[in-house]
């Protein structure tokens, strides 16, 4: 985004010249301009290999976003191939790209039940050894970015998807061996992240918790008890991996966001995508556009909601076809990087139009 736009925003942000703001809003020709009007962050997961090799991909990221999140490059299995050894090359490339383009970065994720390094998976470590490994990992990774790119990684998904479908901490995660109960590692992870970077926002991130339901009730009780216990937790990430089969009831999502914000938590929509069958009909594409619109508008109209990120932005690079064969088309640029109806839906939602 050119420097002029930044300068333009100073008087506008001060509430002066709101007429100019309206004019600017009407002329918003990118998602990041629309987000700036609404004082929000808008972005996507990105891949280092595409930032290195695909100029069209890079030009869209630079034009459309003011925040990015590495898809996999910060995950434990990616950065640590041997115990005690780290390679942050790919993650650093993304954070450096963001810094050069005045973007913020979401860090994901520190404690999760997937993407372990092979060495962790192959050894039967004791609970005490796993506690040491987890705390060392968090201190190393969060400390690395806090030192090399101070303030740039403004939020970490410290714990990802810890609550299972039954509303209890997942027993299958390797971290459940820490302490007496499956969830004992959770406060430890947040405390370690806070110690490693006192300035970063510390989030819990999960899917299937967007509406008021049994899983979001369990997450609500977990975060409420963590906060009551003085655990340093600042926010909740709603991944919002949705689709044509399970549209969100937006009133329920609004109520859900309100109750989490009443806990004093910030909110981010962290991984939005809207799964469709391959070669979707125009009707399905328009339904997808409304879903992007409604989610972005809800974030903008919820004071605690600070960011809307999608999990990818072009159907040419989405996780969905690999994991759900026959489905995809979940994003707002098509395989040829052309905007779909969902792009306009997202843009107008950010502007509350
Ligand atoms: O890097 C290895 C490569 O060396 C190997 O040859 C190849 C084949 O086995 O695998 C590569 O690792 C893959 C990795 O993506 C990087 O491409 C893993 O197998 C694969 O499981 C992994 O999938 C990622 C998944 O998280 C698990 O980490 C997806 O790309 C990523 O989109 C997905 O993202 C998650 C969020 O982190 C959390 N929320 C849900 C979301 C979708 O599952």
Image (cartoon, grey):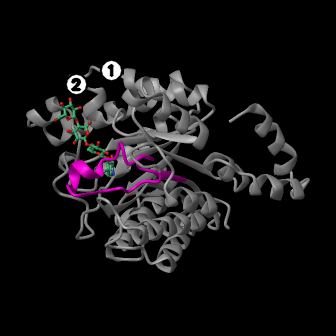
The answer to whether residue 226 shows anywhere in this view is yes
Tell me the residue that label 2 is attached to: 81
Q: Residue at x 32, y 30 (%)?
A: 136
Label 2 crowd (10 A; few <14 / some 14-19 / many >=20) = some
Q: Position of residue 56 (x, y in %)?
A: 49, 33
Quick one: SS at disc 1? loop
Asked which quadrant contains residue 316, the reply is top left
Quick one: SS at disc 2? loop
Which circle marks residue 133 in the picture? none
Q: Residue at x 80, y 45 (%)?
A: 9
160 left or right of 63? left
Main SS type for the magenta part? Answer: loop
Q: Which residues are magenta?
A: 308-332
Q: Quadrant of the C terminus?
A: bottom right
Q: Position of residue 345 (x, y in %)?
A: 56, 62
Q: Quadrant of the N terminus?
A: top right
Q: Residue furthest right?
A: 17
Label 1 crowd (10 A; few <14 / some 14-19 / many >=20) = some
87 left or right of 144? left
Asked which quadrant contains residue 82, the reply is top left
Tell me the residue that label 1 is attached to: 87
Residue 311 falls within the magenta-colored stretch: yes
Q: Residue at x 58, y 68 (%)?
A: 298
- Nearest to the observer: residue 175 or residue 343: 343
Mark 1 → mark 2, Cα distance in angstroms: 8 Å
- Nearest to the observer: residue 239 or residue 212: 239
159 left or right of 117? right
């Amino acid at each position: 985004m050119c420097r002029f736009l930044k300068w333009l925003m100073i008087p506008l942000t001060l509430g002066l010249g709101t007429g100019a703001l309206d004019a600017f809003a009407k002329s918003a020709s990118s998602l990041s301009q629309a987000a700036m009007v609404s004082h929000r962050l808008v972005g996507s997961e990105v891949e280092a290999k595409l930032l290195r090799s695909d100029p069209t991909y890079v030009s869209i990221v630079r034009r459309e976003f003011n925040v990015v999140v590495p898809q996999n490059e910060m995950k434990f299995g990616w950065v640590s191939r041997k115990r005690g050894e780290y390679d942050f090359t790919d993650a650093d490339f993304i954070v450096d790209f963001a810094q050069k383009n005045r973007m913020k970065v979401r860090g994901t994720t520190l404690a999760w039940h997937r993407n372990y390094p092979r060495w962790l998976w192959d050894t039967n470590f004791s609970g005490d050894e796993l506690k040491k490994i987890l705390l060392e990992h968090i201190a190393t990774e969060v400390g690395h970015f806090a030192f090399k790119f101070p303030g740039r990684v403004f939020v970490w998904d410290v714990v990802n998807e810890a609550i299972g479908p039954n509303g209890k901490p997942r027993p299958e995660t390797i971290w459940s061996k820490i302490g007496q109960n499956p969830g004992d590692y959770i406060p430890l992870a947040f405390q370690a992240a806070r110690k490693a970077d006192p300035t970063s926002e510390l989030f819990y991130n999960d899917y299937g918790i967007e509406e008021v339901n049994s899983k979001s009730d369990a997450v609500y009780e977990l975060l409420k008890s963590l906060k009551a216990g003085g655990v340093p937790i600042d926010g909740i990430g709603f991944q919002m991996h949705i689709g044509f089969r399970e549209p969100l009831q937006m009133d329920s999502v609004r109520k859900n966001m309100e109750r989490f914000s009443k806990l004093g938590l910030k909110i981010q929509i962290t991984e939005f995508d809207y799964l469709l069958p391959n070669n979707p009909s125009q009707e399905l594409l328009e339904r997808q556009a409304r879903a992007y619109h409604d989610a972005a508008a809800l974030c903008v109209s919820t004071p605690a909601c600070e960011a809307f990120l999608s999990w990818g932005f072009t159907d040419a690079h989405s996780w969905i076809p690999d994991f759900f064969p026959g489905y995809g088309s979940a994003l707002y640029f098509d395989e040829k990087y052309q905007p779909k109806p969902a792009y306009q839906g997202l843009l107008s939602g950010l502007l509350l139009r």
